[in-house]
Amino acid sequence: MRVLRARLYEQEQEKRQAALSLERRGQIKTGDRSEKIRTYNFPQNRVTDHRIGLTLHQLTDVMDGKLAPLVEASSSTLNPSASSKNSAARDVRC
C-alpha cells in the first residue's frame, strides 16, 4: 500500500511540475527582434516604437526625459478611447 501511495504521489508531483514548466515557458519571451517594443539608435539620433510604428529623430530629448511625444502617440494609438476622454477633459478645463 505504501508503494502504491508513493507512486501516485510521484505521478501527481510530475504533473504539477509539467504544468508549472509549461506556464513558465509561456511567460518567457524568445528575445527575437520581432518582439521588441522600442529601438534606440544612437548614431542616427532615432527612437522607434514598434508597437505603433512611430519613429522620432529626437533620441537625445527622449533620453533627457522629454517623453511627451512618445507617450501621447502611444496612448492615442494603443487606447483611442482614453485619448478622446483625455482630450474632452482638457477641453472642459480650458
Image (cartoon, rainbow, N blue to C red):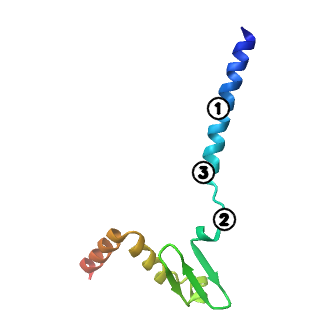
Which three-letter amino acid code belongs to the residue tagged 3?
Answer: Gly
Which three-letter amino acid code belongs to the residue tagged 1?
Answer: Lys
The residue that label 3 is drawn on is 26
- Residue 18 falls in image quadrant: top right
Q: Earlier in the sequence, mark 1 or mark 3?
A: 1
Residue 49 position, x and y percent, is 53, 77
Residue 14 position, x and y percent, is 69, 31
Q: Residue at x 68, y 29 (%)?
A: 13
Are dots 1 and 2 in contact, CB under 8 Å?
A: no
Which three-letter amino acid code belongs to the residue tagged 2?
Answer: Gly
Q: Residue furthest right?
A: 3
The residue that label 2 is drawn on is 31
Residue 72 position, x and y percent, is 43, 78
Numbered mark located on residue 15 in the image: 1
Q: CA distance from mark 1 to mark 2?
A: 28 Å
Q: Residue at x 63, y 44 (%)?
A: 22
Q: CA distance from mark 1 to mark 3?
A: 17 Å
Are dots 3 and 2 in contact, CB under 8 Å?
A: no
Figure disc tally? 3
Quadrant (top left, top right, bottom left, bottom right) of the C terminus: bottom left
Residue 28 position, x and y percent, is 64, 55
- Residue 31 falls in image quadrant: bottom right
Q: In front: 68, or 81?
A: 81
Against 30, residue 3 (above or below) is above
